Image (cartoon, grey):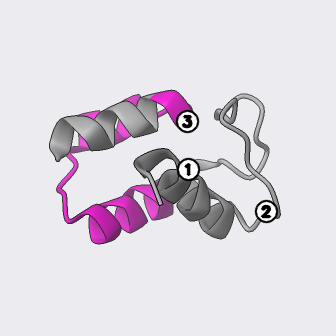
């Protein structure tokens, strides 16, 4: 499983959705609220063994930025 697929799996799990697309963002995903955003960051840190700073977490507003942030930390 590649990085993008892993991130999508985490997003599906955290947001409790059957499907999440690569177009997912805070603007078009109603379940992507502040609580789920923090849960997403925590799951990413656990799975990829990385540490995200609060500013970095705040920048992760869509799927692409999430993937870029994880890549930058690995």
Mark 2 and mark 3 lie on one chain; the one further toward the N terminus is: 2
Label 1: state its secondary structure. helix
72 over 16 or under it: above or below: above
42 in magenta: yes
Across and down, in percent, residue 3 comes to 41, 50
Across and down, in percent, residue 18 comes to 82, 64
Mark 1 and mark 3 lie on one chain; the one further toward the N terminus is: 1
46 over 52 or under it: above or below: below
Across and down, in percent, residue 41 comes to 39, 56
Q: Which residues are magenta?
A: 38-64
51 over 26 or under it: above or below: below
Across and down, in percent, residue 5 comes to 55, 53
Mark 2 and mark 1 lie on one chain; the one further toward the N terminus is: 2
The residue under label 3 is 63
Distance between the Cα atoms at labels 2 and 3?
15 Å
The residue under label 1 is 34
What residue sits 71% from the left and 28% below the top?
A: 27
Distance between the Cα atoms at labels 2 and 1?
16 Å
Neighbourhood count class around disc 2 (C-alpha, 10 Å): few under 14, some 14–19, many 20 upward: few
Neighbourhood count class around disc 1 (C-alpha, 10 Å): few under 14, some 14–19, many 20 upward: few
The residue under label 2 is 17
Q: Which is closer to the viewer, label 2 or label 1?
A: 2
What residue sits 60% from the left and 66% below the top?
A: 14
Left or right: 12 as drawn, with respect to 66 = right
Label 3: state its secondary structure. helix
User: What secondary structure prevails in the magenta region?
Assistant: helix
Exactly how many numbered labels are in the figure? 3
3 over 21 or under it: above or below: below
């Amino acid at each position: 499983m590649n990085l993008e697929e892993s991130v999508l799996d985490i997003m599906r799990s955290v947001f409790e959705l059957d499907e999440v697309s690569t177009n997912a963002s805070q603007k078009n995903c109603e379940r992507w609220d502040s609580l789920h955003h923090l849960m997403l960051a925590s799951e990413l840190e656990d799975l990829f063994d990385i540490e995200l700073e609060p500013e970095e977490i705040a920048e992760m507003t869509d799927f692409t930025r999430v993937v870029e942030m994880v890549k930058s930390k690995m």
